[in-house]
Image: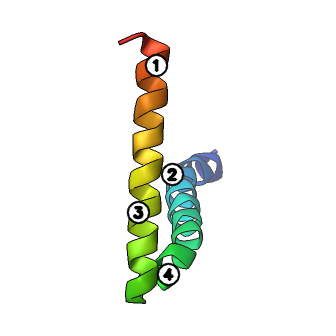
Amino acid sequence: MSEFWDNILRYPRFFFSSVSGLILVILTPFINVIRTTKSRVILLLVTVLIIIFFYLVLKSMAGI
């Protein structure tokens, strides 16, 4: 029975390491893009445009 609880206690550690690894894999291409100045400006503009787009869409959906 102690093996059961040992396995149950390992799940949070496995979950945390899996999620952190996933985040690192997803963010690595963006980190590589940020290293050059021209790409940094383009990425910043695209990010701002996406945020403005979502703001306008949600504002229209809410009827504000």
Say which label, 1 or 2, has the lower sequence index.
Answer: 2
Q: Amino acid at mark 3?
A: Leu
Foreground mark, 4 or 1? 1
Provide the secondary structure element on which disc 3 rests: helix
Helix, strand or loop at mark 4: helix
* Disc marking residue 19: none
- The residue at the far top in this view is 63
Alpha-carbon distance for marks 4 and 2?
Answer: 32 Å
- Rendered position, 37 above or below 59: below
Gap between marks 4 and 1, in whole Å? 33 Å
For label 2, the SS is helix
Mark 3 or mark 2: name the one nearer the start of the chain: 2
| Viewport quadrant of the C terminus | top left
Using the image, determine if residue 54 lies above or below residue 23.
Answer: above
Q: Which residue is label 2 attached to? A: 12
Q: Amino acid at mark 4?
A: Val
**Residue drawn 59% across and 62% down?**
18
Mark 1 residue type: Ser
Percent x, y of residue 37? 37, 87
Which mark lies nearer to you, 1 or 2? 1
Residue 59 screen position, x and y as percent: 40, 22
Q: Which residue is mark 3?
A: 45
Q: Which residue is mark 4?
A: 33
Residues at circles 4 and 2 in contact by the CB criterion of under 8 Å: no
CA neighbours of label 1 inside 10 A, class few (<14), some (14 to 19), many (20+): few
- Mark 4 and mark 3 residues within 8 Å of each other at the beta carbon: no
